[in-house]
Image (cartoon, coloured by chain):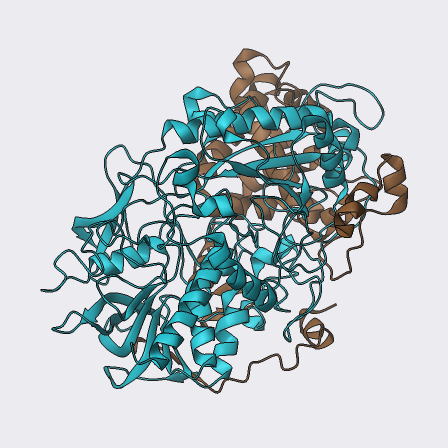
Amino acid sequence: MKRRDLLKNIGLGTAGVMVSGEAMSQVKPKVAPVKEIPEAQNGKLRDEIIHDNKLKAAKFFTPAELATITVLSDIIIPADSKSGSASQAGVPAFIEFIAKDMPQHQTPLRGGLMWLNTQSKKMFSKKFVALTPADRLKVVDLIAYPNKAKKEHSQGVSFFNLMRNLTATGFFTTEMGVKDLGYMGNTPNKWDGVPDDVLKQYNLSYNEWEKHLAK
Amino acid sequence: MNDFQIKEQANVYDVVIVGSGAGGGMAAYQLTKAGAKVCLLEAGGYFDPADPKYINQLKGPWESPRRGASTLRAFGDFDAAWGGWEIDGEPYTRKKGTEFDWFRSRMLGGRTNHWGRISLRFGPKDFKRKSVDGLGDDWPISYDDMAPYYDEVDKLIGVFGTKEGLANDPDSIFLPAPKPRLHELMLMEANKKTGVLTIPSRMSMLTKPINGRGECFYCGQCSRGCMAYADFSSSSVLVIPAMKTGNLTLINNAMAREVLTDETGKATGVSFVNKYTLEETTVRGKIVILAASACESSRLLLNSKSGNHPNGLANASGIVGKYLHDSTGASRSAFIPHLTNRKRFNEDGVGGMHVYSPWWLDNSKLDFPRGYHIEYGGGQRMPGYGFGFGMENVNGKHPDRSGKMKEAGGYGASLKDDYRFFYGTDIGMAGRGEAVAREDNYCEIDPNVVDKYGIPVLRFNYKWSDYEIKQAKHMQDTFEEIIHALGGIPNGTKPGADNNYGLAAPGRIIHEVGTVRMGNDPSKSALNSQCQAHDVKNLFVVDGGPFVSQADKNPTWTILALSLRASEFIMKEVKAKNL
């Protein structure tokens, strides 16, 4: 249900408010704005819109780095019978935005990608994206398992942990990912407790709770 | 809304209020209803949760490029709070050795837009702590004085819960309580073994519509603000209705600089800075009410020096800014193995816990004097930035969907399935406890620093005492017991003495109170029991400032009741021509 329709359906009357008192905002200085950005729009404030527009216009990763990120993210979360891959869900673009938004990730990501290519060249004399799928996994296997990785690969482990985290978050917060996960909320409803079959599954009931209502 | 160029208000308002949060909003509502002409100054912008240009409610995480992360807003992109811990051009400082973080919500309704809606009355003991344990001071009023006002707040604003008849956690006039979620049923069950009392929570969401507001539709996003006005926010429930009376003049983006007084020492109005033009304006009023939040009101008073008030306004006692105290807070999370592979259903519920644990022990038998309550979190929540982080710490310790143990971390189809398999298996618990108010925890005016408006800023001096540290230790021990009784595995290592048992830095719980405290003795308090300044009869403070002690209960319900009571007193005094 669209938010606008919801307002009508919940009987709030006018979406606006009948104001017979006065509300005075302050006069803004007469500075010519670069673009007419309203004080607030779609839940965001002007400063936030300007900030995010700046970030979106900026570039951080090179095309080569983005290509590596794409390959990596699809190794981490591939397509399967339930849903598409990380790149199909737009995860590389998400990671690019996050690197711009959270600069503390820039060196770990950029440096980690370099580390990966160095390791790749050591083993196969080629950059990571130029390897065969099977050879890529041989490199990844060195850094994907923190508890059994070799000490000399520990920085690669840190990098892969970061990539795994960002890929998972980037995937499961998309429409595709939320559907895959099976999150069923974020919709108006009337909560009436845990479904009966689930109560049964865990051998629980509302009997105790109902005693609180009776007091 | 009109754009006015204000220089000097020719008219004198009946009341000028600074701050539109719980206390200021309540005063504006009550006084405009009674026919007073009120001017309400709010440092932040206008906000109405029902106006589409502000709405983030019901957005999916993909509607934020950072998926709701906290880069721009302290509690995430979708959270209602504008402002935060650090505001450009509005610094605050700390004395050496002090860790204090100060939150400001610069918007109509203030913190009531994003708060947790936990609505707990103080109990009889909470007004008389010195009589109970010899520490701190008693309030000059009792629970019996406050009960009728709590009743009015319940009816006006709405709170759900269940009648429990607990000695120090009085019942409200309750709306129906929502059924517990799955992990909450498990907690109630587990706590039968631990003895930690666990009852339906008391929250201000409307499980039944009242006073023309909408009914809760269980999206779990109260902290984003509610377009149906189904949760309490001062903007929706108090200020916007106050505007409908025609008696309220609301001025947004007005940074109050000082309270003005005349040669007799009486308050005459408030001077403020227009945040856009940086011009100074004066608003005159017969009565001035400060509700800018405890520390901000203290700052205003301390910055309002004059011949009659050399130490700042309402500060003949010298205590303004002192006795600052915030709730204690410590938390722990856990993984619940038997919750893997959960059946999916919508369990958003309200935007907070459906059950909680009020303080259940006797402090006289413990090594710390004051109690705490426990808040619980968990369930199948909306994914946001951070979802899935740390899977390498979970999937190596538990068999996956196929029943096999595997190496921690990994990648590929098996990992992708782990996120599904382990979804909704985490729970968290947080203690929120009472700290002892001490004179040597305070905020004062920094002698060197001004904000961008030229207003001297606050400097904080604060240290937790052993009482709070021991209380946090007890919280961690209790959390482990509960997690064990749940059959869960605590995450990470148990916080220990080296980091104060996870005790949050002061200010982080955002319940700071006590800096303009009330009392019967004008040499030891700034206000009388009606929130009226001892030194200045037409000046009142109705935020968390007046609190003598804070209780193991969130302050908002008591702020609302106190402001309601003070408003009633003001109306009586005006009628009697005493004000």
Q: Is residue B518 left or right of residue B156?
A: left
Q: Is residue B409 left or right of residue B156?
A: right
Which of B146 and B38 lies nearest the eye of the viewer? Answer: B146
A47 left or right of A14 in image: left
Residue found at x 71% / y 65%: B208
Report the number of discs: 0
Image quadrant occupied by the N terminus of chain A: bottom right
Q: Is residue B469 above or below residue B141?
A: above
Task: Pick out the residue farthest to the left.
Answer: B307
Q: Nearer the viewer, residue A52 or B538?
A: B538
Q: Dividing the picture into quarters, in which one does residue B575 lie?
A: bottom left
Horizontal relation, residue B142 to residue A131: left or right:
left
Residue B353, x across and y down, in percent:
65, 47
Relative to B52, is B365 above or below?
above
- Residue at 61% across, 54% down: B203
Quarter-wise, where is residue A3 in the image? bottom right
Asked if residue A60 shows in the view, the reply is no
Quadrant in which residue A87 is drawn:
top right
Q: Which chain is brown?
A: A
Residue B452 screen position, x and y as percent: 24, 60
Colour of chain B as rendered? cyan
Q: In this view, does B437 lie above or below B576?
A: above
The relative height of residue B111 versus residue A171 in the rendered view (above or below) is: below
Res B127 seen here: yes
Q: Position of residue A161 (x, y in %)?
A: 59, 28
Residue A56, percent across and down? 50, 56
